[in-house]
Image (spheres, grey):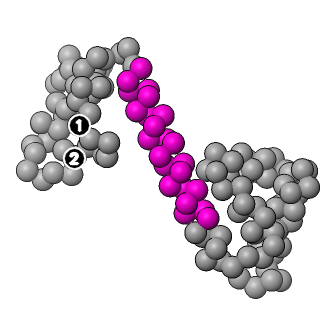
Amino acid sequence: MGEDRWPKICLREEMRGILNRQPSKWGEKIKMLVKEMECERVIELIYNNAEIEVIEEEIKNGLEVYKKMMEKKVEEKINNSTYSNLYKKLVLTNETENYWCDKEVKNTDKEIWARARSGNLTRAGKKKV
């Protein structure tokens, strides 16, 4: 993107505000997000007109950190859940559940798994009126 393009100018100004500790509301959210992603360096890179590849790599690494953090939070919620003790026993892998993508598994079996995981086994076939 050219140096004289308004989106780039506005983004750099926002990064300047963050670096000067005077961010806008949007800047506050950006600052909080990059802190969670552990890639605060992105703000300086954008402000200093770093190469796009460097910024992309930093953001990519930050997204990996964020993804792992979110997976850990979900796993903690599952393990600490008191709603259904059966739910934590049905989680087989750390990845997404394979049965959704498997073409050989019948839809009724998928529905049973989903109902078991959500603690909703008793509502099978019943419609709420």
Can you name the residue that lies furthest to the top here? 82
Q: Nearer the viewer, residue 82 or 69?
A: 69
Q: Which residue is mark 2?
A: 98
Type of the residue with mark 1: Leu
Q: Nearer the viewer, residue 63 or 122?
A: 63
CA gap, disc 2 and disc 1: 9 Å
Q: Position of residue 42 (x, y in %)?
A: 71, 62
Q: Which residue is mark 1?
A: 92
Q: Earlier in the sequence, mark 2 or mark 1?
A: 1
Image marks 2 and 1: residues in contact by CB distance under 8 Å? yes
Residue 29 tag number: none
**Callout 1: SS:** loop
Q: Position of residue 26 (x, y in %)?
A: 77, 51
Image quadrant where one finds the C terminus: top left
Magenta highlight on residue 63: yes
The residues colored magenta run 58-80
